[in-house]
Image (cartoon, helix red, strand yellow):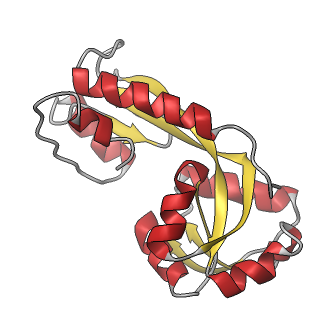
Amino acid sequence: HRLLVPALASGPLRLVCFEGKLDQLLARLSIHELDMVISDAPIPPNVNIKGFNHALGDCGVTIFAVKRQATKLRRSFPSSLHGAPWLLPTSNNTLRRSLDRWFDANEILPVVVGEFEDSALAKVFGQQGLGCFAGPTVIEKEIALQYQVSVVGRVPSVREQFFAITMERKIYHPAVVALAKEARLKLNKAGRPRSATA
């Protein structure tokens, strides 16, 4: 939502959004069924399309839980996350692989309660107190407010990346230009270090 709003402000536009696996979306992009794909990863080397990655920026992640869990886990963060219940992205997700590396580096063994392709569904389970979950620090306030959860801690070393993938080397479409400009501005601002980090 935060990425797409500037596109709507760029002029008359009908926004049609699809969600799916990256390879399927890229296949549709390659035959011009889509104008752009927003992804947390660039075009994989094994995908045979001639598209272009436009880096929008990146940000760290924030760990969330319901208030009672967050208060307990915040005390000795991040070691407190060892043995804590977790709601994680599925293993094919870029964020999941980054979190797994961070868990290993910090000797944290999470108790995986659920794995989700849909990050919004993971947040709903987190809202019910079933485990902690990670989300982009750039939308930390919105996540906390919408799902009534609290910040456990921030992990700036785990980066969530954002790409606009198009069939053109240079972005010309006014809506995509507006989207990219605003995303880079917000993500650059969000990339600054914050307190309560690991």
Q: Position of residue 144 (x, y in %)?
A: 54, 68
**Along the horizontal axis of the image, is 61 left or right of 72?**
left
Is residue 43 or residue 164 the one in the foreground?
Answer: 164
The reply to whether residue 46 is in sight is no
- Reply above or below: 183 against 94: above
**Along the horizontal axis of the image, is 143 left or right of 9?**
right
- Reply above or below: 196 against 129: above
- Reply above or below: 192 against 123: above
The reply to whether residue 69 is in sight is yes
Q: Position of residue 4 (x, y in %)?
A: 31, 41
**Along the horizontal axis of the image, is 172 left or right of 2?**
left
Q: How many marks?
A: 0
- Kindly indicate the quadrant of the structure image that contains residue 191: top right
- Kindly indicate the quadrant of the structure image that contains residue 75: bottom right
Q: Position of residue 171 (x, y in %)?
A: 32, 16
Q: Identify the residue at image location x=84%, y=66%.
A: 78
Query: Is the C terminus in the top left, top right, bottom left or bottom right quadrant?
Result: bottom right
Q: Identify the residue at image location x=86%, y=56%.
A: 105
Is residue 152 or residue 44 the one in the foreground?
Answer: 152
Q: Identify the residue at image location x=54%, y=59%.
A: 141
Is residue 159 or residue 70 the one in the foreground?
Answer: 70
Q: Position of residue 57 (x, y in %)?
A: 54, 32
